[in-house]
Image (cartoon, rainbow, N blue to C red):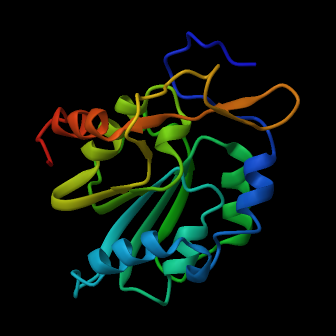
Amino acid sequence: MQSINEKSNIMYKSESFLNYYSETRMKWEDFYPSEKKILKRIFDRYDQGFELLDAGCGCGGLGKALCGKFNIKYYTGLDCNRKEIEFAKENNQLSIPHHYICEDIAVYKDSRLYDIVVSLSCIDFNIDVKGMLESCWEKVKPGGYLVTSVRLTNNETINDINKAYQKLGENEVANYVVFNIDDFLKMISELRNNPA
């Protein structure tokens, strides 16, 4: 089990994510209605196409789902799970320029900025959520978009792996951060070049 005092992103070793993401979220229809509504609204603003970074891409399903459906010019899928990235490279070759990188978004260095950075079902599975959010925001071009999903509550924020987690196997759990909405809005307002 991971240390609860660890203040970096967790490199999950369980095949739970691979098993799930290699079978689901590979087609546009697989994504949640709320995700599709928000993403479509943003994508439609780019008549000339857009470049997208998928932070926490899993097996590359979002890139696969977008190709041919939207005017995506370039896709980078980034995930710290080597098995998922290997799956993406072997099974999700896209018809546009793209690449898959096995790296933690918190330490990923690239001079490329993106029109849109997406991190779905990823940021709040880590301990350093603010660091993840900052790293994603740093990759967005001026005037661009960061789209992320988080779990919200009216109650107190829970960022304790002993209280909120998802069991991934016998010896591994995923931190499961649930934010008080005011705490999350404050975190966004504190980002460099404040987007809020």
Please identify the quarter of the rendering in which residue 170 is found: top right
- Kindly give the residue lying farthest to the front in the view shown: 155
Q: Quadrant of the N terminus?
A: top right
> In the displayed structure, does residue 87 sit left or right of residue 154?
right
Residue 89: x and y, percent?
A: 67, 63
Residue 91: x and y, percent?
A: 73, 70
- Residue drawn at 69 percent across, 18 percent down: 2
- Residue drawn at 22 percent across, 88 percent down: 47
> In the displayed structure, does residue 178 sit left or right of residue 87?
left
Residues 75 and 22: in front is 22
How many numbered marks are there? 0
- Residue drawn at 64 percent across, 69 percent down: 25
Residue 87: x and y, percent?
A: 74, 60
- Residue drawn at 65 percent across, 12 percent down: 3
Residue 148: x and y, percent?
A: 39, 54
Please identify the quarter of the rendering in which residue 132 is found: top left
- Kindly give the residue lying farthest to the top in the view shown: 5
In this rendering, the answer to whether 37 lies above or below 183 is: below
